[in-house]
Amino acid sequence: MRIGLAALRSGRRAFGPASAPKDQDRSRSAGRRSGAPRAGLQAIGHDWSHFRDVVLILVRRNFVSRYRNTAIGMAWALATPLLFLLVFYFVFKVIINISIDKYASFVYIGILAWTWLQAAVTDGTAAITSNPNLVSQPGFPVAALPIVSVTANLFSLAVAFPVLLALLIVEGARPGFAILWLPAIVVVQYALTLGLCFFAAALNVAARDMQHIVPILLQIGYYLTPIFYSGDKVPGHYRAILRINPMYGLLESYRAVLIDGRIPDLAGLAATLAFSLVLLVTAASYFRKASYRFLEDL
């Protein structure tokens, strides 16, 4: 918690309540009357610079502390999805012999994408309640905490990504230039995950039941998302219901780019992006309003 403590204490609260002494208010008013727009822009730039620094410091701390004092360190970011891959491959490919081409790559893509969302939302739900010392710091940008949850878990996904590339090569997949669409798909999932984290984090402060409800919802979502099965095998009327899940389309996009080497369904990806942005804006607004009561409820 001592890492960058000076940076965490400086600056004003972003997406949260802020207060300033009366003499500062008077000086700002005088500045406005004298017509100095650059000072206002510099203040905004300082706020966002401070916000960025806080996020970077906490992401690093989160990522490093996650694997500190463990026997294999960051290798856990590889071991966990690989263990799930081995189980799914043995059950569904060896025993059941499911007819999905390049099944190891197919499943591993689903595991990585879902693990990012699940871990980020789980961490994000407790982001405020598990950091009361940070939240109580004057000027601390509380909105940084859900962002840290999403970003730190994205780094864990990045650590496991080389294994996915190796699987794709072994199974004969050739992404080609279609892989240039991968960052766009990641951005869409980032927006979706961050929106969920903002909502869950704010709700969990007022109602601690959320930390028990969220894992249940995520477990249900795990089976309703085509991670280890193909959505094409689902009967049409049920498939229409499953497509409501935004992760359904995201997994199809990932697999189209990485396995099939083709451009993803742009209409479907655009629809998921629109939903994710609406969710993110709505959730951020709710989080900002709820943040005024965080200190009272903690």
Image (spheres, helix red, strand yellow):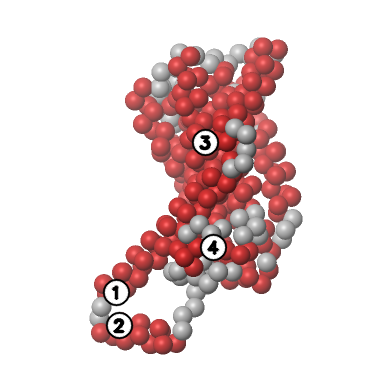
Q: Which residue is located at x 44 percent, y 42 percent? A: 187
**From what the image shows, is residue 243 above or below residue 41?**
above
> Tag 1: residue type?
Ala
Residues at circles 1 and 2 in contact by the CB criterion of under 8 Å: yes
Label at residue 157: 3
Disc 1 element:
helix
Disc 3 element:
helix
Distance between the Cα atoms at labels 2 and 3? 47 Å
Q: Quick one: quadrant of the N terminus? A: bottom right
Q: Which residue is located at x 49 percent, y 68 percent? A: 9
Mark 1 / mark 4, whichever is N-terminal: 1
Distance between the Cα atoms at labels 3 and 4? 24 Å
Label at residue 179: none
Q: Which residue is located at x 67 percent, y 41 percent? A: 218
* Residue linked to disc 1: 39
Distance between the Cα atoms at labels 1 and 2? 8 Å
Q: Is residue 66 visible?
A: yes
Image position, residue 55 (x, y; %): 47, 55
Q: Is residue 5 left or right of residue 130?
A: left
Image position, residue 42 (x, y; %): 31, 69
Q: Residues within 10 Å of mark 3 (few under 14, many from 20)?
A: some
Mark 4 / mark 2, whichever is N-terminal: 2
Mark 1 / mark 3, whichever is N-terminal: 1
> Tag 4: residue type?
Val
Disc 4 element:
loop
Label at residue 31: 2
Distance between the Cα atoms at labels 1 and 3? 40 Å
Label at residue 142: 4
Q: Which residue is located at x 70 percent, y 44 percent? A: 215
